[in-house]
Image (cartoon, rainbow, N blue to C red):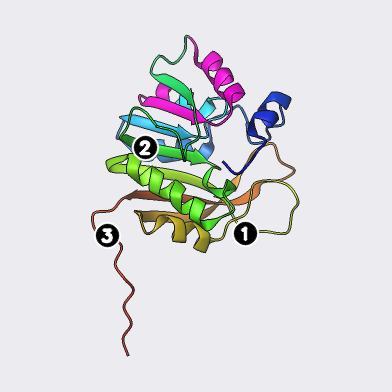
Amino acid sequence: MPHPDWEKSYRAGDTPWDTGEPDEHLVAFVRSGFSARGRALDVGCGTGTNAIWLAQQGFSVLGVDFSPTAIESAREKASGTSPDCRFEQLDFLAGEVPGGPFELVFDRGCLHVFDEAKDRERFAARVASLLAPGGRWLSLIGSTEGPERDWGPPRRTARDVTNAIEPVLEILELRSIEFRAKLPAPAPAWLCVARPREFPAQPSTRRE
């Protein structure tokens, strides 16, 4: 992982992204008609809030995170309340992810932490390899919209997002939203929904 301080941040409690409430965009997505209550993977699950909520909606959930402290907190939070929710500490790009394939993969602010395009492409390819046929990936990504700021999530362009995802998955939706975390103000972001491809991405055509 490119960020050396995830564990340090969780140990220090310096986690402005951890609101303690399930993400409103995840809640809306699940409640708006996504009915495949199968296996779900929460990438970068942190202290488990979203994973536990998914389990309460009927999913069999695996939450993974780089930080051992985050995973320990998630397990404590889920103890006795969410029997179909488990947590594993691992590096998503390098570690073996058990329990797939998944009908839903969710990440709230993981794809955008990678500064290098090749690493964002690897992330998307890893998600593609873990999705079940007909599954969905819901990704929330800091965007380049809005005014300058020196706080909040990393900023990625729509081109950064599509360049990483489109070769390996079909993008169903890409739209502007806001992150409402413990920040000075809401931060502009992208909501991206993708699914496994029925056909490989076709080359662009040019007519003379």
- Judge the density around disc 1: few (<14), some (14-19), many (≥20) Cα neighbours within 10 Å: some
* Residue nearest the viewer, comparing 188 with 207: 207
Whether residue 142 is visible to the viewer of this picture, yes or no, is: yes
Q: Residue at x 73, y 26 (%)?
A: 12
Instruction: Specify the amino acid type for callout 3.
Output: Pro
Q: Quadrant of the C terminus?
A: bottom left
Mark positioned earlier in the residue sequence (2 or 3): 2
Residue 104 bears which disc, if any?
2
**Which residue is label 1 attached to?**
144
**Which residue is label 3 attached to?**
200
Q: Nearer the viewer, mark 3 or mark 1?
A: 3
Residue 62 bears which disc, if any?
none
> Vertical placement of 27 versus 88: above or below?
below
Q: Residue at x 72, y 31 (%)?
A: 14
Where on the picture, by quarter, is residue 67?
Answer: top right
The boundaries of the magenta stretch are 55-79
